[in-house]
Amino acid sequence: MVKASDRLEYVHSDIRGPLYQEALRMESEGTIVLKLNTGNPARFGFALPNSVRQALALHIDDAVAYCDVRGMKDARDVICTYHIGRGLQGIMPNDVFICNGVSEAASMAINALIGNGDEILLPSPCYSLWSNNTYLSGGTPVFYRCDPDNHWNPDIEDIKNKIGTRTKAILIINPNNPTGAVYSHDVLVALTDIAREHHLVVLADEIYDRLVMDSLRHESIAALASDLPCITFNGLSKSHVICGFRCGWMVFSGPKGELDEIKNGVMKLAAMRLCGNALAQLAIPSALADSESTREMLVPGGRLHEQRKATCEGLDKIEGASYVENKAAFYLFPSLEKEQFDFVDAQDFAMKFLHEYHVLVIPGNGFDWTEDLRFRIVMLPEPAVLSKAMNDLQYFLNHHRILKKY
Ligand code: PLP
């Protein structure tokens, strides 16, 4: 048998991994599975915003040819203006690279920045896109802890303890997947202080910045650190429910010239794939001008707001389950008190829940979190469906509860 590259050894994409394959197998045998594994709103009836539909209809002919390697100029202008509005200083349209999703932007940035033996600080729990790209680049992810007892903010002391001579960058995912946390101003400032002291490049995955609830305000970390080399990632997959279009970007900011080598590296990688999906780029100006279609999902009565409510109310009834309410996006990362149940670990819990109640959730280890028994729920189905899923979870857990011996 031909051996695969060693670099794949630690790569894991559990959201579409063995549990998901098992769910597909069950479906092929006629079982209906509620798949709460991917953050893919259109799968749950979220409609394409009219702003996007109209832009595509009007301009489709403009997307027939390969476009600029960095992305269409009009779209980069608008992205640049958007991030200036979010407080980034000194950026120009040429600091923007439009890619086939944040996924591709992350791959290019990590491959341009991280080489053999370089370390990058990544959050735990982590969206595995970032750790996987680090493994592929030959680098080493060093996980810092985010603290459920502090609204899932990063643990600053833990970060300080994990910095070594090879640490080159720190990734901040804010708002976060899988916790749905929005980091506090003080924590963001503390993170910039660490980056400044240790000369770290700041990578900021802010794809959920428009999906914040409860009148909270999201702060772009690059806006707090105009003196630091930063790469900020964002895209339309979630805010405009167009995951399938593959539309994301990255913006380089900070002291002039400091990231030029990395930018040139990204340019080489971008040129290898000729250009990003031009059709999706046509939607960027109208989408970024349309904040209303996103906002209406988040306010009371809006789907994301009501779906969170249904899920949390369901979880509140379950003894031995706890959670930190998400403040953004549509993820919850609840925990179970391990000693109350007969599960070996989170993987065992998730597989049994899938087999017995036909609900697919992703265990904490899929997000490089092993501290306790946790799993991620994607709160994208309608409230009634989520209420039923939480009811099912309650029955399931009661069945697996270890009876107290007196
Ligand atoms: N970053 C985070 C934190 C995500 O949750 C996701 C997708 O779920 C991505 C990046 C990838 O997004 P895209 O569809 O733009 O590739």
Image: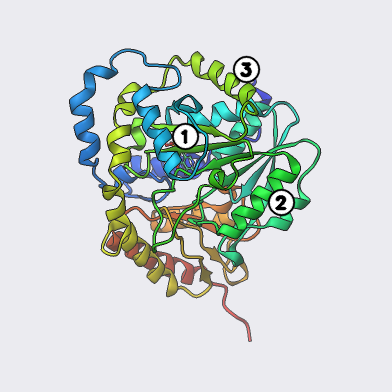
Closer to the eye: label 2 or 3:
2
Q: Residue at x 46, y 65 (%)?
A: 325
- Identify which amino acid the numbered label 1 is placed on: Val
As drawn, the residue found furthest toward the bottom would be 406
Q: Is residue 257 left or right of residue 321?
A: right
Residue 200, percent from left and from top? 69, 39
Q: Is mark 1 within 8 Å of ligand 1?
A: yes
Asked whether 69 or 257 is in front, the reply is 257
Image quarter of residue 231: top right
- State the CA–CA distance, disc 2 to disc 3: 40 Å
Q: Sort mark 3 into few (<14), some (14-19) or many (20+) by Cα contacts within 10 Å.
A: few
Residue 23, percent from left and from top? 41, 45
- Identify which amino acid the numbered label 3 is placed on: Val
Circle 3 is placed at which residue position?
2
Circle 1 is placed at which residue position?
102
Closer to the eye: label 3 or 1:
1
Q: Is residue 363 visible?
A: yes
Residue 5, percent from left and from top? 65, 22
Q: Residue at x 43, y 61 (%)?
A: 216
- Identify which amino acid the numbered label 2 is placed on: Ile
Circle 2 is placed at which residue position?
159
Image quarter of residue 76: top left
Eyeballing the image, is 314 above or below 156? below
